[in-house]
Every structure is written in C-alpha cells, then in structure tokens.
Image: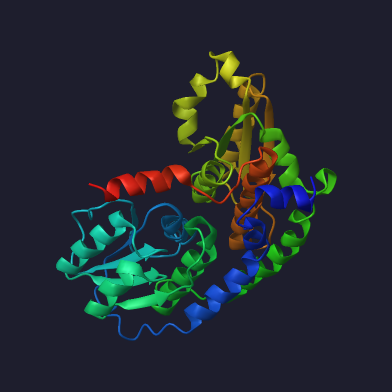
Amino acid sequence: MNIQSIKAVDKENMLDVLVNFPNQIKDAVEIADKVNVSGVNKEGIKNIVINGLGGSAIGGDLVRSYTSNEIKIPVYINRNYFLPSFVDSDTLIIVSSYSGNTEETVSAYKKAVKKNCKIICISSGGTVEKIAGENQHLLVKIPGGLQPRCALGYSFFTLLITLFKLGFIKDKTEDINEVITSLEKKSKVYIKHELESNTAIKIAESLKGNLPIIYSSVDILDVVNLRWRGQMSENAKILAYGNLYPEMNHNELVGWKLNENILGKTVVIFLKDEDDYERIKLRMEITTEIIKKYATKIINLNGEGTCRLARIFDLIYLGDWVSYYLAIMNKINPTPVEAINYLKNKLAEK
C-alpha cells in the first residue's frame, strides 16, 4: 500500500479529513467557546432530548453516554420523525443535523416548536437554520462541506461545551486538551502505510473478507461500539454486527454454535476500557473461551489515555482509520454513500 494506490481509490480525499480530525476538534472548541447561552431559558428543564440521525446523532449519543454518571436529568436520543410523549415546555430540545435538511430531524424540530420546548440547534445551515432564525432559537453554526460521519468533532464537542455553559456538567477543558494531544500523535502513526507499524492497517487486514463483530460494555463504550459498526458500513461498505455486555451473555452467546461456515468468517473485536466493571471484564474473558474455537480471530483493544474521554476518542479514531483502510484494501471509495443518496432521492419523489 502506497500513497499513489490510496489516492487512486480515495477520490474525495477522506485521508485528509482523517489526518486533520484533531484540528476539527480545535475548531469545534473555538466555535463553542463563542456560543452565548444567555438567551436560553435554563429554568425548570427536566429532561434533554437530542434529535438527530446517523452521523449527526452519534455526537449526541456520545455525549449522553459520556456524561451519564454526571448529568442529573434524563438525556434521550431521538432518531425519529416524532417526539416522545413526555416532551413538553420543560424539555430542552437539541436539534442536531449537520446538513440542516435531515427530514426526520426537521419533522421532530417542527413538533418541538409547537410544544413550546426550549430549543438549541447545531447545524451547518439548511432548513434547521431557517426555522431557528424564524423562531429566534440559538443556533451553533458549524462548517459544512463534510460527510456527517466525518464531522463528529463538531457534533460532539460543540454540544459538550454548550452543556457545560448551561451548567449541566463540569468544565472538560483539561480532558479535551488531552484528546487533541493524543489524536495528533496517533494521526502521525495511522498515516504511515506500512503494515508492521500501523495498528489500523493490521486490523483492516484481519477484517478483509470477514464479518466484524464488535463487543463492548454498555456503560462506557456503547456508542464507540455503534460508531465502529457505522463506519464499517459507510466507509468500508461492509456489514458489521455488535452487541453489549452484559446483555450479550443472556441470549446471543448461545448462538455461537451452529452455522460454522458463517462463524468461520467472523472476526470478533472486544473494545475495552480500564474502568469497565470487574464482572464485565470477567464475562468477556469467559465469553472468549467459548467463542474462540468458532471465530476466525479475536482482537482485544484498549483505549489509551489518562482520562476516559481520551480513551473513548482513541478507540473512535482507530475505528475510523480501520474502516478507511479496509475500504482502500477492497478498492472502494470510502466517501460516497450511494445507497443512502438513492433512498433520499426516492423519498423526495413521494
């Protein structure tokens, strides 16, 4: 693998987007630092509902997971045209749509306006910006021009800092700085195209021609697990499966027996964190004993970093690179999502 062969496949230059992801985080922090939340009525907020789909939802989902042990009110991720029945004027609605035109999110946004919810928008423009302007809602404007899944730095860090400004969580500046420093170092490693020194390429090589199955704890890495699966589908254009502990041990574990011809084409990736509950760690060890004779390979990955946020993004960044290199190995452009575009075009005709 060399830069010429990569560029021949990566026609939209996702490589550059991946390399510059730490700079995207810096930009997101700068944008969020300038956000003025004084016009947001914080009194009486009983719950937070984050509305988004796909790449625009993952940032909110990650905020929910990361702050679950700190934030004192329920946080709900809404991936739908409609709002949950509990939503009312005491709900803080976060409208997260990178393009600003996601039809499900726009639909939910309009319903939130009718319910007189407290509303904050994160978007690069589109219909969301138009509705926000008409209703004088706070809009955190982020740059456009990226695939939504490539804008995680904008969707996550702008929301995280905004929630701090609203008083829901503590200041995360120190942790964010560690994330940036760590990913800047990893960027220099992952851009090297030698198999021996690049973990992302090694993992991609193991996944080629196989079905990835991602396992992790439900408490810390649930959304990282989801991110890995989503990136495999959108970047590498392959199906990926996953599940969470401890639920996996109460049903799916028994399925590791028949269909040996399928199981023999699976690579199991355990995403782990040092703060995983001890009983979860034990469950993963025992599960490995059970499934190792069926899977092609089992890979254990631990996030690196002194703080939890750094370890989370260490694994996210690795997964992004793995999916990218897997696309290159399969000689398929990682950027286009033709099936999604076809679906949207057909929906627009109705």
Residue lying furthest left in this view? Answer: 114
Left or right of 330, for residue 219:
left
Q: Find residue 212 and report its image quarter.
A: top right
**Quarter occupied by the N terminus:** top right
Front residue of 134/316: it is 134
Q: How is the image coloured?
A: rainbow
Q: Position of residue 299 (x, y in %)?
A: 69, 36
From what the image shows, is residue 258 above or below residue 124?
A: above
Q: Residue at x 36, y 76 (%)?
A: 139
Residue closer to the observer: 275 or 150: 150
The image position of residue 213, as x and y in percent, is 57, 33
| Residue 338 visible in the snapshot | yes
Residue 236 on image: x %, y %: 59, 42
Q: Is residue 130 left or right of residue 312?
A: left
> In the rendered view, does 194 fall on the left or right side of 206?
right
Residue in the picture at 42% in, 60% down: 60
Residue at 72%, 61% (x, y): give it.
187
**Count of marks overlaid on the render:** 0
Q: Position of residue 307 (x, y in %)?
A: 63, 63
- The answer to whether one can see residue 115 in this image is no
